[in-house]
Image: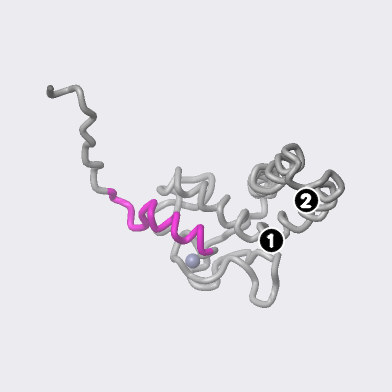
Amino acid sequence: MDGLFFTPTRMPPTAFKVSRIQILHRGLTNRCPNCGGRTLFKPGTLFQLNRQCPVCGFLFERDNDEGFFLGSMSLNYGVTLIGFLTPVMLLAYFKVIDTTTAIVLAGVGAIVVPALFYRSSRSWWLMNYYFFLPQHLPANGGKGRGGD
Ligand SMILES: [Zn+2]
C-alpha cells in the first residue's frame, strides 16, 4: 500500500529571519512586512500610505515604482466585483431583492466597498509580493522590491 497515499514531506527549515507566516500576519494587519511595525498608513489619515516604515525605515513606496500599487487596485476591483457586486446580482436574479434595490445597492456599493477595502488592498498587495519573494525583504538580506 505504500505509495498509494500522499505522504507530506517536511519543508526544509527556512533560512529567512522573516517567515512567510509572519509576512501573511503582517499583511493582514496592515503592518510593515519587514519589521512588523505599525503602520503602513500615516496616523490620522485613512488613505495616505507612509513613504517608509516609521520603525525600521523600510521603503513602502519608491520614486521609480509608481506602477507597483496598480496591483492593489486590481485586487480591490476583484474583491468588490466578486465579494459584493456578484452576490447583489445573484440576489436580484433569484428575485430575493427587486431590480431597483439591486441597482441602488450596486451603485452605492461600487463606491463604498473599494473605499472600505482600500487600506487592506494596499497591505495585501505588499504581502503578496513578499510572500512569494521573501528574500527581497531587507530583514531577510534583500534590498526591497526589484533586488535580492
Ligand atoms: Zn518596518
Query: Does the magenta segment cover residue 28?
Result: yes
Q: Quadrant of the C terminus?
A: top left
Give the residue displayed 28% in from the left and 49% down from the top: 14
Splitting the image into 4 quarters, where does residue 118 fall?
Answer: bottom right
Q: Amino acid at mark 1?
A: Leu
Relative depth, front residue between 17 and 72: 72
The residue at which mark 1 appears reads as 116
Find numbered disc 2 in the image and state the secondary structure of the residue it sits on: helix
Find numbered disc 1 in the image and state the secondary structure of the residue it sits on: helix
Residue 15 in percent (x, y) is at 28, 50
Splitting the image into 4 quarters, where does residue 51 fall?
Answer: bottom right
Residue 72 in percent (x, y) is at 64, 49
For label 2, the crowd category at 10 Å Cα-Cα, with few meaning under 14, some 14 to 19 and many 20 or more, is: some
Relative depth, front residue between 40 and 74: 74
Relative depth, front residue between 123 and 77: 77
Q: Residue furthest left?
A: 1
For label 1, the crowd category at 10 Å Cα-Cα, with few meaning under 14, some 14 to 19 and many 20 or more, is: some
Pointers 2 and 1 in contact (CB under 8 A)? Answer: no
Magenta residues (range): 14-29
Query: Does the magenta segment cover residue 136?
Result: no
Q: Amino acid at mark 2?
A: Ala
Q: Is residue 35 left or right of residue 15?
A: right
